[in-house]
Image (cartoon, grey):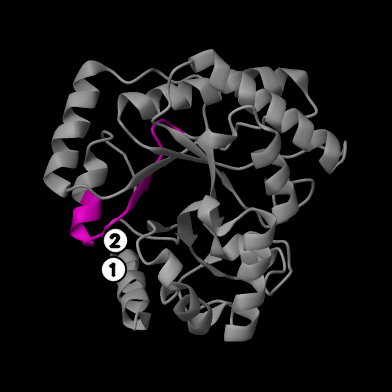
Amino acid sequence: MSVAGGLHLAFERISRVNGQALQIFTRNQRQWQSEPVSLSERELFMQERKKWGDGPIASHNSYLINLASHKKEIRDKSRQAMAAEIERAAALEIPYIVMHPGSHGGDGPEVGLERFVRNLDASIELVGECDDVMILIENTAGQGTGLGASFSEIRYILSNSLFGKRLGVCLDTCHLFAAGYDFRSPECYRKTFDSIDHEIGIDRIRFFHINDSKKELGSRVDRHEHIGKGHIGLDGFRNLLNDDRFRNHPMTLETPKGADLAEDRENLAVLGSLII
């Protein structure tokens, strides 16, 4: 949900669509420098959150952050920006931060993954005690030199971080499909999620991004589409939504929408109709 006009306004917007799980940006995702959460900002946020209820909330970190970058200047800025995001999430009592593993910039996945883990750990160390905030590594579509399209790469992150117990996974359905993991038939669904379980463990999944895909299976192109109108189609989402393992997992839409949020209401209605 948009936070235009103030972080607290996300709750008014999600209430308009009867949403049960929320994701926000705590600051402008296209800027390096961001102010910490003010006392008045926190008070307004907590006040409106109480009115909304006790639904799960995640923040998504800035798209500028690339802890795996081949450029030292970008890594340095990314460490500071990630630490600031953790501090804001802690101040707002947001339990999850979703982040992409970033891009190795041509140096290769092994080098990129090692850099990501080292700099993520450094970001956490800059903050210190924020044990109530879990960082969720989001799977990616695999565009260009991006990391995280395979679950073996995500396993490396979870296994090699000094703070592995504070890390989890956010599973994006569009990215999953674009990376070549099919889940449209019951057989393909079982195969894909058995693979995920083998690589990282199903219990590491804490959050979902529910998006259809404009591009075909294995395209490695990240283009979100409205539910049932892309190449995944309704059957893939039906399989996921009726998997008892994920009945209580928070799931948020990242599909295009206008100011009246009509698209969110339509997508939520479609998803609701798939639940048995």
Image spot of residue 259 (x, y percent): 30, 55
Q: Secondary structure at mark 1?
A: helix
**Residue at 58% from the left image edge and 29% from the top image edge:** 163
Is residue 119 covered in magenta? no
What label does residue 261 carry, if any? 2
What label does residue 152 carry, if any? none
Quarter of the image for residue 150 reads bottom right
Relative horizontal placement of residue 65, taking residue 240 as reference (left or right): right
Say if 242 sits above or below 154 in the image: below
Pointer 1 residue: 265
**Picture quarter with the C terminus:** bottom left
**Residue at 49% from the left image edge and 16% from the top image edge:** 127
Say if 190 sits above or below 170 in the image: below
Image spot of residue 269 (x, y percent): 30, 75
**Residue at 71% from the left image edge and 25% from the top image edge:** 118
Q: Nearer the viewer, residue 235 or 74?
A: 235
Relative horizontal placement of residue 223, taking residue 145 as reference (left or right): left
Relative horizontal placement of residue 106, taking residue 48 as reference (left or right): right
Q: Nearer the viewer, residue 6 or 19?
A: 19
Question: Within 10 angstroms of label 2, few (less than 14), some, or many (20 or more) residues?
Answer: some
Residue 92 visible, this orientation? yes
Q: Which residues are magenta?
A: 13-28
Q: Amino acid at mark 2?
A: Leu
Q: Amino acid at mark 1?
A: Arg
**Residue at 41% from the left image edge and 72% from the top image edge:** 244
Whole-number angstrom distance, CA of label 2 to CA of label 1 = 7 Å
**In this rendering, which labeled residue sits more in front, label 2 or label 1?**
1
- Check whether the beta carbons of the residues at disc 2 and disc 1 lie within 8 A of each other: yes
Relative horizontal placement of residue 13, taking residue 174 as reference (left or right): left
Image spot of residue 109 (x, y percent): 82, 42
